[in-house]
Amino acid sequence: MYIVQVHITVEEDAVQAFRIATIENAKNSVKEPGVARFDVIQQQDDPTRFVLIEVYKDEEAAVEHKKTEHYKKWRDMVEDMMADSRYSIKYHNIFPPDDGNW
C-alpha cells in the first residue's frame, strides 16, 4: 500500500464549502480501482485544519487518481479556500498487511 496524508488549512469562512467539496471528492475516489481508503478528517480544536488520508494499492494508483475528473474539479474548487499551501507526507504500510482489511 502507498499512503498519503494531505494536510490542509482552510479559511475560516470556507470550512463548510471545503467539507462539502472534499466529501464529494472522497466519495468518488473510493470508487477508483486503485484506492483502498480515502478518509477525510477534521481537527477537533481547530476546524480549519483537515487531513486527507489516502490509501492506494500502489504509487501508480495515486498518479492515476490525480488524472480523474473528480480530483481536478476538487483541486480547482478548493484552491481559493486554502489559508496556506497544502502539503503531503507519503508513507509505506506496516500494519495491517496489504492484503488485510482496508
Image (cartoon, rainbow, N blue to C red):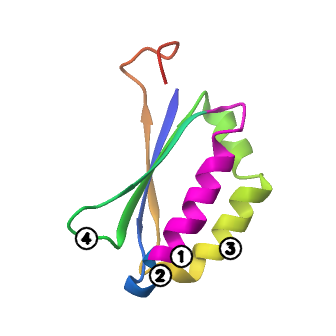
In front: label 4 or label 3: 4
Camera-near label (3 vs 1) is: 1
Q: Position of residue 73 (x, y in %)?
A: 73, 66
Q: Residue 33 occupies which quadrant of the picture?
A: top right
Q: Residue 27: within the magenta? A: yes
Say the numbered circle drawn on residue 17.
Answer: 1
Q: CA distance from mark 4 to mark 2?
A: 13 Å
Task: Identify the disc placed on residue 76.
Answer: 3
Q: Residue at x 69, y 35 (%)?
A: 60
Where is residue 26 drawn, in percent x and y? 59, 51
What range of the chain is rendered magenta? 16-35
Amino acid type of the residue tagged 3 in the rendering: Asp
Mark 1 crowdedness (10 Å alpha carbons): few <14, some 14-19, many ≥20: few
For label 2, the residue is 14
Q: Which residue, given by chain and number where applicable, does mark 4 sit on?
A: 46
N-term mark: 1 or 4: 1
* Residue type of the residue flagged with mark 2: Ala
Q: Are marks 2 and 3 in contact (CB under 8 Å)?
A: no
First along the sequence among labels 3 and 1: 1
Relative horizontal placement of residue 89, taking residue 44 as reference (left or right): right
Foreground mark, 1 or 4, reads 1
Callout 4 touching callout 3 (CB < 8 Å) = no
Which residue is located at x 65 percent, y 46 percent? 29
Q: Nearer the viewer, mark 2 or mark 3?
A: 2
Q: Secondary structure at mark 3?
A: helix
How far is disc 1 from disc 2 in space, using C-alphas? 5 Å
**Secondary structure under the numbered disc 4 in the rendered image:** loop
Distance of mark 2 from mark 3, alpha carbons?
Answer: 14 Å
Image vertical order of residue 10 relative to residue 74, above or below: below
Residue 37 appears at what percent x and percent y? 53, 36
